[in-house]
Amino acid sequence: MGRFTLAKIIAVTNQKGGVGKTTTAVNLSACIAALGKRVLLVDIDPQGNATSGLGRNGDVENTVYDVLIGEATAAEATLDTGFGPLYLIPTAIELAGAEIELVAVENREQLLKAALEPVRGDYDYIFIDCPPSLSLLTLNALTAADSVLIPIQCEYYALEGVGQLVNTIKLMRRKLNPDLAVEGILLTMFDARTNLCAQVVQEVRNHFRDEAFETMIPRNVRLSEAPSYGLPIHLYDARCNGAKAYQELAKELMERNR
């Protein structure tokens, strides 16, 4: 496929669960692909929600688990989703045990980085959907990534989680990935009717003026329905607020990376 540019690798992560991390990984990837960019989504969360959210369940030959243990290449594990130039390396439940298997492996934090290196020239963006914990899998994602996209829910404890993550990123820079940058902080599940949401937004924008995305993702029932149909939001219901927000976010992220 020989392209001259290398993909930008973005890890979508937050150590806190339930913040819209997988929703963001799936829909942002799909909306960027809909704008004509070649995108690879790597599902490194053993729960496999990004895999099922793109309509893939258990019918796959190779997964990210096979890639990490060296039994398949990234190219061999890559599936065409059928949603434009969007490709997927799926996960499987065996990945939950990979942590234990990989403990004795040398350079175990570098396995994903090494696996993605040969395919970086084939894509414009590679997104990694991380588990909601600081595990060996997440460390692999943060070692492989150029930057981190942090979704945070508009709620009282939001900034606490971000503080922990910022410390993790500093640690990663010292130990494993000196060039790791913050791609942006994304406010999710925004509800304009509550004062608390408005306060959280204000606080995040004060703390992280340059990092916070302008686009915010609203609370939207259609966003939670789409995965059960195995469709990204813009193909499930293009007119809903959730679809419009992720399309805006896709444009904003591409603008930042021009």
Image (cartoon, rainbow, N blue to C red):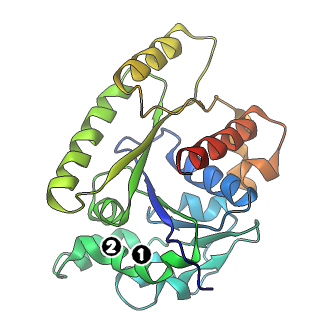
**Residue 230, visible in the rendered structure:** no
Amino acid residing under circle 2: Gly
Q: In front: 125, or 53?
A: 125
**Residue 117, visible in the rendered structure:** yes
> In this rendering, is residue 23 above or below 137?
above
In this rendering, position of residue 39 left or right of residue 11: right
Label 2, secondary structure: give it. helix
Quarter of image, res 15: top left
> In this rendering, is residue 187 above or below 252?
above
- Contact check, label 2 and label 1, Cβ < 8 Å: yes
Label 1, secondary structure: give it. loop
Identified at 67% across, 63% down, the residue is 37
Identified at 53% across, 50% down, the residue is 257
The residue singled out by tag 1 in the image is 94
Would you call the spot at circle 2 few (<14 residues within 10 Å), some (14-19), or many (20 or more)? few
> In this rendering, is residue 156 above or below 131?
above
Spot occupied by residue 25 in the image (x, y as percentages of width and height): 55, 53
The residue singled out by tag 2 in the image is 97
Q: Which mark is residue 188?
A: none
Spot occupied by residue 161 in the image (x, y as percentages of width and height): 32, 34
Spot occupied by residue 187 in the image (x, y as percentages of width and height): 51, 31
Identified at 75% across, 32% down, the residue is 241
Identified at 76% across, 71% down, the residue is 82
In this rendering, position of residue 125 left or right of residue 164: right
